[in-house]
Amino acid sequence: MIKWFEKHSKISCGITILIALIIFYLSSRSFAPSSGQTSSISIIYHFCAFFFFAFFLFISSIRGKEKYSIFLLVILISVLYGISDELHQFFVPGRHCSLSDIFIDTAGIFFASMIYFVSVRFRVSTPTKFKNKQCSN
Protein backbone atom coordinates (compact mmCIF):
# COMPACT_ATOMS: atom_id res chain seq x y z
CA MET A 1 0.00 0.00 0.00
CA ILE A 2 2.84 2.40 0.84
CA LYS A 3 4.45 1.69 -2.54
CA TRP A 4 1.21 2.68 -4.28
CA PHE A 5 1.16 6.03 -2.48
CA GLU A 6 4.86 6.52 -3.31
CA LYS A 7 4.16 5.82 -6.97
CA HIS A 8 1.25 8.30 -6.91
CA SER A 9 3.05 11.04 -4.99
CA LYS A 10 0.62 13.74 -6.16
CA ILE A 11 -2.19 11.92 -4.36
CA SER A 12 0.02 11.61 -1.27
CA CYS A 13 0.80 15.31 -1.46
CA GLY A 14 -2.91 16.10 -1.73
CA ILE A 15 -3.66 13.93 1.31
CA THR A 16 -0.89 15.70 3.25
CA ILE A 17 -2.37 19.10 2.41
CA LEU A 18 -5.87 17.89 3.29
CA ILE A 19 -4.67 16.64 6.69
CA ALA A 20 -2.89 19.96 7.32
CA LEU A 21 -6.09 21.86 6.47
CA ILE A 22 -8.18 19.63 8.73
CA ILE A 23 -5.71 20.17 11.59
CA PHE A 24 -5.89 23.95 11.02
CA TYR A 25 -9.70 23.91 10.85
CA LEU A 26 -10.07 21.88 14.05
CA SER A 27 -7.57 24.16 15.79
CA SER A 28 -9.68 27.16 14.80
CA ARG A 29 -12.79 25.89 16.57
CA SER A 30 -13.69 27.42 19.90
CA PHE A 31 -14.65 25.24 22.83
CA ALA A 32 -16.00 25.96 26.28
CA PRO A 33 -13.19 26.65 28.74
CA SER A 34 -11.77 23.46 30.21
CA SER A 35 -9.80 22.66 33.33
CA GLY A 36 -6.60 22.69 31.27
CA GLN A 37 -6.09 18.94 31.60
CA THR A 38 -5.42 16.93 28.48
CA SER A 39 -8.14 14.33 27.86
CA SER A 40 -7.48 10.92 26.36
CA ILE A 41 -9.44 11.91 23.23
CA SER A 42 -7.20 14.95 22.80
CA ILE A 43 -4.09 12.79 23.17
CA ILE A 44 -5.35 10.30 20.57
CA TYR A 45 -6.34 13.13 18.20
CA HIS A 46 -2.97 14.91 18.43
CA PHE A 47 -0.96 11.70 18.08
CA CYS A 48 -2.97 10.37 15.13
CA ALA A 49 -3.33 13.69 13.30
CA PHE A 50 0.40 14.38 13.32
CA PHE A 51 1.27 10.72 12.72
CA PHE A 52 -0.72 10.74 9.46
CA PHE A 53 0.41 14.25 8.52
CA ALA A 54 4.07 13.26 8.87
CA PHE A 55 3.57 9.82 7.31
CA PHE A 56 2.04 11.20 4.12
CA LEU A 57 4.59 14.01 4.05
CA PHE A 58 7.32 11.34 4.18
CA ILE A 59 5.66 9.37 1.38
CA SER A 60 5.18 12.38 -0.89
CA SER A 61 8.68 13.77 -0.22
CA ILE A 62 10.92 10.71 -0.07
CA ARG A 63 9.03 8.28 -2.34
CA GLY A 64 10.82 5.15 -1.15
CA LYS A 65 14.40 6.34 -1.56
CA GLU A 66 17.04 6.59 1.15
CA LYS A 67 17.28 10.39 1.31
CA TYR A 68 18.42 11.15 4.84
CA SER A 69 18.59 14.94 4.43
CA ILE A 70 14.99 15.05 3.18
CA PHE A 71 13.99 12.62 5.93
CA LEU A 72 15.31 15.02 8.57
CA LEU A 73 13.74 17.99 6.79
CA VAL A 74 10.33 16.29 6.85
CA ILE A 75 10.68 15.71 10.60
CA LEU A 76 11.60 19.37 11.09
CA ILE A 77 8.69 20.61 8.95
CA SER A 78 6.24 18.35 10.81
CA VAL A 79 7.43 19.44 14.25
CA LEU A 80 7.33 23.11 13.23
CA TYR A 81 3.77 22.63 11.95
CA GLY A 82 2.84 21.10 15.32
CA ILE A 83 4.36 24.08 17.15
CA SER A 84 2.62 26.56 14.83
CA ASP A 85 -0.67 24.71 15.42
CA GLU A 86 -0.31 25.21 19.16
CA LEU A 87 0.63 28.87 18.73
CA HIS A 88 -2.42 29.29 16.49
CA GLN A 89 -4.63 27.84 19.25
CA PHE A 90 -3.32 30.50 21.64
CA PHE A 91 -5.31 33.09 19.67
CA VAL A 92 -8.53 31.06 19.47
CA PRO A 93 -11.06 31.82 22.25
CA GLY A 94 -11.52 28.85 24.56
CA ARG A 95 -8.28 27.20 23.41
CA HIS A 96 -4.82 27.29 24.88
CA CYS A 97 -1.25 26.65 23.81
CA SER A 98 0.01 23.48 25.45
CA LEU A 99 3.54 22.15 25.64
CA SER A 100 2.16 18.66 26.33
CA ASP A 101 0.25 18.79 23.02
CA ILE A 102 3.49 19.66 21.22
CA PHE A 103 5.15 16.62 22.82
CA ILE A 104 2.23 14.39 21.80
CA ASP A 105 2.37 15.78 18.23
CA THR A 106 6.11 15.11 18.16
CA ALA A 107 5.61 11.55 19.45
CA GLY A 108 3.21 10.88 16.55
CA ILE A 109 5.70 12.39 14.11
CA PHE A 110 8.60 10.28 15.41
CA PHE A 111 6.49 7.12 15.40
CA ALA A 112 5.56 7.79 11.75
CA SER A 113 9.21 8.47 10.92
CA MET A 114 10.32 5.18 12.50
CA ILE A 115 7.70 3.16 10.64
CA TYR A 116 8.46 4.82 7.31
CA PHE A 117 12.23 4.62 7.80
CA VAL A 118 12.07 0.90 8.62
CA SER A 119 9.77 0.33 5.64
CA VAL A 120 12.14 2.08 3.23
CA ARG A 121 15.22 0.50 4.76
CA PHE A 122 13.72 -2.99 4.51
CA ARG A 123 12.66 -2.52 0.89
CA VAL A 124 16.00 -1.02 -0.16
CA SER A 125 18.11 -3.64 1.63
CA THR A 126 16.09 -6.63 0.36
CA PRO A 127 17.56 -7.76 -2.96
CA THR A 128 15.12 -7.62 -5.87
CA LYS A 129 15.73 -11.23 -6.90
CA PHE A 130 14.35 -12.38 -3.54
CA LYS A 131 11.31 -10.10 -3.73
CA ASN A 132 10.14 -11.56 -7.02
CA LYS A 133 11.34 -15.14 -6.56
CA GLN A 134 8.83 -17.82 -7.54
CA CYS A 135 8.91 -21.51 -6.75
CA SER A 136 10.26 -23.50 -9.63
CA ASN A 137 9.45 -27.10 -8.79
Image (cartoon, grey):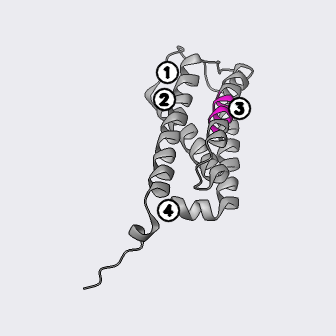
Q: Secondary structure at mark 4?
A: loop
Q: Give residue 135's position: percent from left, percent from top.
A: 29, 80
Looking at the image, is mark 4 or mark 3 earlier in the sequence?
Answer: 4
User: Callout 4, which amino acid?
Assistant: Met
Q: Are marks 3 and 1 in contact (CB under 8 Å)?
A: no
User: CA–CA distance between discs 1 and 4?
Assistant: 34 Å
Residue 1 is labelled as: 4
Residue 89 is one of the magenta-drawn residues: no
Q: Secondary structure at mark 3?
A: helix
Q: Say above or below: 90 vs 20.
A: above
Closest to the observer: 86 or 40? 86
Tell me what residue is drawn at x 52 percent, y 34 percent: 110
In front: label 1 or label 4: 4
In front: label 2 or label 4: 4
Looking at the image, is mark 3 or mark 1 earlier in the sequence?
Answer: 3
User: What residue span does the magenta drawing correspond to?
Assistant: 74-82
